[in-house]
Image: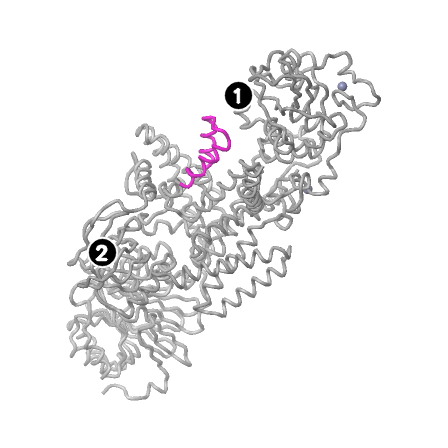
Amino acid sequence: MKAADAVSPFRQRLPFAGLLLAAIAGILFSDGLSVSPIHSWITLGCFVLILGCCGSAGRSIPALGITFAAFALIHAWDWNASPSRRIAEWWDRHPGEYEVRGVVAQEPHSSPSGTLSFALRIESIAPAGEEKTIAASPIRVMVHWSGDAVEYGDQVSFRAVPSRPEPPRNPGSMDYPAWLARHGIFTQFRLDPSVPGHMISQGLGNPLVRFSIMARHWAEQILGIDLEKPSAVLGAIQGICLGVTENAPEGFTEEFRFTGTMHLFAVSGLHVGMVAVILWFFFQLIRLPRVWSVAASIPSLFLYVSVTGFKDGSLRAATMASLFLLGLAFFRRSPPVNTLAAAAFLQLAADTNSLFSAGWQFSYSVVLAILLLASPIRHRIVTWHCADPFLPPRLLTHPERIRFAIWAEFAALASVSFAAWIGSLLPTLVYFHLISFSALGANLAAVPLAFGVLSLGMLSLLTGGISAWVAGAFNNANWLVTKLLLLTVQGSALLPGGHWFIGPPPKPYPVITFLDLRGASCAVIRNGFCTTMIDAGRKRDAERSILPMLESAGVNRIGSLLVTRSDASHLGGIPSLRRDFRIRDLVLPSDPGKSPSARAIFSSQVHSTYPKSGTQWEVSPEILARSFLAEGDAVTLRLCMAGVTVLWVTRTDDAALAHLEVLAPEDLRADLVVMPLGGARMETVCALLRRIAPRALITPVGGFGRNSIPSQEWTGVLGDLGVTLFRQDQTGAVILSGDPKNPTIRSWLPAGPELKLNPENREKPGPR
Amino acid sequence: MPEQSEGERILSPMRRLGGILLDLFYPPHCSLCGCRIEAEAEGEGAVFCEPCLADILPPPEHRCPLCSHPMAGLMLCPNCDGRHWHLETIVPSCRYEGGVRGMIQRFKYGRDIAMARPLGTLLLRALRDSRLEGKTFDAVVPVPLHPKRERERGFNQADLLARLLSRSTGIPKQDLLKRTRPTAQQAGFDRSHRMENLRGAFVLRQQLPPDASILLIDDVSTTGATLDACAAVLKEEGAAEIAAVVVARG
Ligand SMILES: [Zn+2]
Ligand SMILES: [Zn+2]
C-alpha cells in the first residue's frame, strides 16, 4: 500500500492548487495594470492557457474566475488605492512641515549609529502651526526617530517634513522604497535632533504583539544564559530557534547564503513543525481529548509564530501544521501539496503583497520541491544500493542489514536536501545572484546539526523558566553543536567553486561603475569577464554597497584592486572583499599613512606596490594604467581603455595638486576626472582642469567635516569650462560605458545628468 | 415541528458550506491507492476508488452462522460447537486480506487515525448481512481498550468505528463497558488461554436500559473471545440480545 505522498500529483485532487494559481494570477494582473499593462495581459493569457490545458473540470472555472477577480480587486485596493500611497502623493504636491501624532506599530529597530526607526500608524496629521487635521485614515509611515526612548505601542507626537524613502544609490543595492511599499509604507519622516519627538502615552498597541515581543526578549535571554554575548554562535542559536532579526551581526548570514543553507534560518519553518510535535505530545500526555488537543495546539502554535516575528516560513509551517491537526479532528487527510497550496492561498488572502516577498517565495518553492521531488529521488538513491528484493530478509547477514539501513537513512536525508536545493535554485538566483554547489554537501551535515540546535534550544527554553542552571547546561551543549554547524558552513563556503555568482552577460566593451559611497571611493571596471577595482570604500560600504554590486553583476574574482590612498575610506573594505572574493593582485601605495586601520590592513594583507611614478603598465587586457605618486600615501591614476581616458585624483589640497602641475599636458589629458571637490581651492582646480580638458567630472559627496560637501557654485564654474559635473549626491553611482560606437556617462539615479562622449562631439569647443 | 424545521433551515446551508470547505481542505482521495475520487460520490465511493473497491471482497459465502468462520455446510464450526456463546452472532464485513488487512494494521499499529473513515464505511456492509436484517438495536457499544493502551495508541479504534457507525445509522453510541485489566496481547494464545486471560477483564460502567438489544463493535475478531467476554457482562446485567459486527475476521 502506498502512502498518499507517493502518488503523482496528477492523480490527486488538489483544489487549492487551482485556487492558488487563480489568486496569484489575479494579484499579478492587478499589480502590473498601473505600471506595465502588457505584463498584466500576458499574465491573464498564461492563466487562461493553463486553465485550458489542465482544465480538469469545466465546472470549477466559475470558482477560479471569481477567485481571480477577487484577488485582483483586493490587491488593487491594497496596492494602488491604499490611503498611505494616496497621502504620499498628496505630500509630494504639498511639501512642508507637519505635526504628526500616531502609535508605534513595530518594535523599533536600532541602527549601528543608534537611531531608532519604526513604522508608525498615524492618528492625525496637521500642517505645522495649524489646528485642522488633514488625514486620519489608516496610514503607515516610516519614522527615523530622535527624542524620548520609545517602544512598540507608544503614542508619540513630533514635527517633521515628510519625504519619500531614498531609492538605492548603487546598482545591486536593496531597493528599500520598493520593500517598504510592499509593507504599505510610502513616506518617511526623519526627525531633526534639535526638534525631538515626544512620547505621549504607553501601551496602545495590540496586547498580543506586545506579549510576543516580551516573550521574544525573554526567549533570547534564556538562550543566552551562560554564553558569551554578543557572539556569532549566540546569533546563530537565536536565529535558528527564533528566526533571524535585524540584530544579527552584519555579514553573519553570508556563509549560509553561499552554501545554500540560508533556509535553516528564516524560511525553514522546521522549528514550528518541531514545536507542533512537542505540543501534541504534551497534550496527549496530560490526556486531553483529541479534539481539545487540536483546539489547544493551533493557537499555541500561532503564539509561537508571533514570538518568532511572523516570518513567512513559520507562518507557512504553522498553517500547514494546523491543517494537518484539524484533519486529525475530522479523520481526514489531505495530499501535502494541497495543504501547502492552502497555506499559500490563506497567506495571500491575508496580505496580497506577500507574493512579492522573498521569504514567501523561498519558503513555498523549497517545500513544494521537497514534496514533489524528495520521494522519487529517494527511491532512485535507495535502488543504487539495496538488498535484492527477491531475497528473503532473513538471509541477510547482520552487517549487511545495518549497511542497507544506514544507506536508506542517508537516502532519505540526501533526497530531502537535494530536493530543497532544486527548490531554492531559482529564488537564490533571483535574490542572491548565485548558484551554490556546496549546498548539496553542506545541507547533508547542516540540516541534522540545525535540528540538534533547535532541540537543545527548545529544551533550554522549556527548562529556562524553572532553573537557569539547567538551561545554561543546555546552552553550553548547544554552543558546541552550533560551533560545529558554523564550522561546517564556513568550511563549505571556502570550497573553491562551491558557489558562483551569476549576473547578466558582460558587455563586449569596458564598463566602469563609480559607486556612490557618500564620501568614500570605489570604482569597478568590468571588461568582459575581467574585473578591476579602484579603492574599496569603508568596511560598511563594502558590506552594504560594494559586495551587492559585485554579486549582482556576476563577478566571481577580482583581477587587480588598486588602492589610491592609505586611509579607511579607501581600503577599509578590503577584508570583506577578500573574504568573499579572490583578489589576484592587491596594489597599495608605498606609505601606510597614519591611520591605524590602514596600518592594520597593510600588515595583514598580501599586497604589491605601484611601479615607479609615471610608468605605464597593463592592469588587465586592454586597460593601461599610469600612476603618479602624490605624497607617498596617495596616488593619482590615469586609466586608458577603449579610447576613453579617466584621471583619478585622490587628494585635492594645493600640495597634492602641485605635483600634477609639473606633468606634461599629454600625460594629463583625460575625458573624465574623478576628484573630491569638497575643500579644494577653486582657482587651483580650474587651472588644472584647463590643462586636463575633461568632458565630465565626478565628485563624491558626503563623509565627515565641512570639507565633504562641495559648494553649489561648482556646477556653474565647471559649466563655463565645458565640463559636466556629476555630483554623487544627485547622481548616485555613475556608469561609464566604453561602447566604441557610443561612449556615454550616465547617472544611476534618474535625476542626475547623462552625457554622450561621441567622438564628433569631442572636437567641439573644449576649454576656454 | 416548526421549531425544528426553522433550525434545520439555518443549519443545512451551513452544513453544506462546511462540507464544501472540508472537501477543499481535505479533498476526497482513495484510502488505498491515494488517487483522486469523484467529489460527489457517497458511501464507499467517497473513500475508495472503483478499482480498489473491486478488490475489497465480501466474506466467504459459506461460513459458520455464529462466528462466521469460513466452512461449508449449515452446521456450527468446531470452534463454536458445544461452546456457550453470549452473542447471537459475529458479522464481519470483509475478508481479512490485501488492502483491508493493510488498513487495519495501519489503523491499529501505525496509529493512522485517517483510516477510521474508510474502515467505518466498510463496517456498514455488515449491517446488510442476512443475519442482522430486520433487527433493531438500542445502542452501539465499542469494545473498550484499557486506558493505558489507549493512551499509548492515542485512540481506541473500536470507539472511533462505533462513533462513525452511530453517526450513519442513528443508533446512539454508549460506552457501557470498561476494561479493568490490561490483558496481554491476544494473538498467539490458544482458545482456553484467551478465555482465561479475559475473564473478569470487563465491567459495566453504567446501567443499561432493560431488555436492550445491543450491537458490539470491534475492528477485528479472531476467535470472538473478546467480544463474547463483553457480551457476557452485558448479558449478566440484563441485555436481551447482543450481536457483534467487525470489519474483518482475522
Ligand atoms: Zn484506489
Ligand atoms: Zn463458528
Q: CA distance from mark 1 to mark 2?
A: 73 Å
Q: On the rendered image, what quadrant is the N terminus of chain A found in?
A: top right
Which amino acid, mark 2? Arg
Residue A47 colored in magenta in the image: no
Q: Main secondary structure of the magenta part?
A: helix
Q: On the rendered image, what quadrant is the C terminus of chain A found in?
A: bottom left
x and y percentages locating residue B168 in the rendered image: 64, 34
What are the residue bounds of the magenta stretch?
A: A276-302
Residue at label 2? A599
Q: What residue is rendered at 59% in x and 49% in y?
A: A14
x and y percentages locating residue A561 in the rendered image: 33, 63
x and y percentages locating residue A534 in the rendered image: 31, 66
- Does residue B173 appear to the left or right of A542 in the view shown? right
- Does residue A385 appear to the left or right of A758 in the view shown? right
Residue at label 1? B148
x and y percentages locating residue A175 in the rendered image: 36, 62
SS at badge 1: helix
Q: For residue B234, which quarter of the picture? A: top right
